[in-house]
Amino acid sequence: MISTPLTSHFGLTTPVIGAPMAGVGGGELAAAVSAAGGLGMIGVGSAATAEFVEQECALPRGRGLRFGVGLMAWALPDRPDLLAATIAARPDLVSVSFGDPAPYVGPLRDAGIAVAGQVNTIDDGHRAQAAGVDLLVAQGSEAGGHTGHRATLPLLQEVLALADRPVVAAGGIATGRGMAAALAAGAAGVWIGTALLACPEALNSPAARARVRAAAGEQTVLTRAFDVAQGLAWPERWPGRALVNDFSRTWHGREAELRADPEACARVAEARRTDDLEQQPLYAGEAVGLVTVERSATEVVREMTAEAEGALRAVATLLG
Ligand SMILES: Cc1cc2nc3c(=O)[nH]c(=O)nc-3n(C[C@H](O)[C@H](O)[C@H](O)COP(=O)(O)O)c2cc1C
């Protein structure tokens, strides 16, 4: 068994956190990760409802499983209902990502909920630590979904140097070898999203899962085009990493023109309604090339853990 400050804090049997993924990670996915001894999280996007939070959190909780919820700091000033619903759902962990977590740490901790801050720069790391989060998540730009511009390994090493509390690594980790590398670097655990995109417990469609399984690691793009098209108030410093498709091929790098083209913008909303994979965002990270089969998140986490144990043992033999 791999023991770290993360596993002892949350009573886990493996230091794996199933990343919150808006639109993909609901209660079933979180429950499947937690059933393997990790900590599954539920992703709450800026357009989610308080009812969604309540319903999805009831799934792992109803089975006596630990779970977490991921909120987006930039969206919360306009959506106090999402924070209130999250606190009412009593998760074990809440992450407050993409913005300053300071206003939310107090209310969450007062409710007995641990807080994680996902950070993309050194300044973010200092800010999250000053805000009093329990856990720092160093998220590299290899990650699927919205992210910053620093790669995981250098960012992780710098955040470890500044941190006086556990740091978890996110971005590009989808195998036990990758997990072992992050742990060897000093991370207290790994935060995996893309590795779970082809799991049947996810909220994405079977067609989207098939597309994920077929995609190579070179076929992602870090772009603001989908946010611009949907008129989302995402701050510019966090573009999103998605699978390359017809829409991103046409509009990535032409965001100003896109903003002035209501027809093109409407296409994304329509594509999300009809599940048109060429015109909607399919957020996925560079590790997508490692995701080739559809299997339960419980199995993904178990296999990753077993492989990491083997990799860590093998590394120890290098010492002679
Ligand atoms: C489809 C998708 C949706 C995501 N949504 C969120 C989200 O709602 N909140 C959040 O904090 N991070 C979100 N992320 C980022 C993850 O929390 C995590 O940092 C990332 O998946 C880790 O990198 P990996 O994809 O290479 O494993 C999302 C990622 C993906 C792939």
Image (cartoon, rainbow, N blue to C red):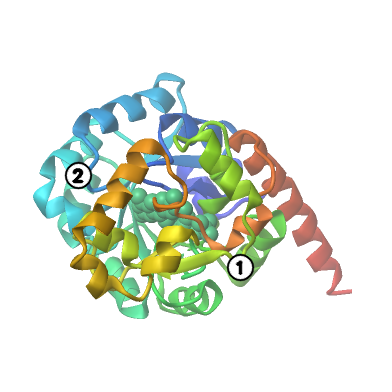
Mark 2 residue type? Asp
Q: Residue at 33% x, 59% y: name it.
A: 226
Q: Nearer the viewer, residue 24 or 101?
A: 24
Circle 1 residues within 10 Å: few <14, some 14–19, many ≥20: few
Where the N terminus falls, by quadrant?
Answer: top right
Mark 1 residue type? Glu
Indicate the position of residue 251 as horizontal and vertical percent values: 36, 68
Give the mark nearest the N terminus, 2 or 1.
2
Indicate the position of residue 96 as horizontal and vertical percent values: 29, 55
Q: Nearer the viewer, residue 33 or 293?
A: 293
Q: Residue 110 carries which label?
A: 2
Q: Residue at 28% x, 71% y: name it.
A: 255
Indicate the position of residue 244 as horizontal and vertical percent values: 50, 62
The image quadrant where one finds ligand 1 is bottom left
Question: How far apart are the alpha carbons under marks 2 and 1?
Answer: 44 Å
Q: Is residue 137 visible?
A: no
Above or below 264: residue 275? above
What residue is pinned by disc 1?
A: 218
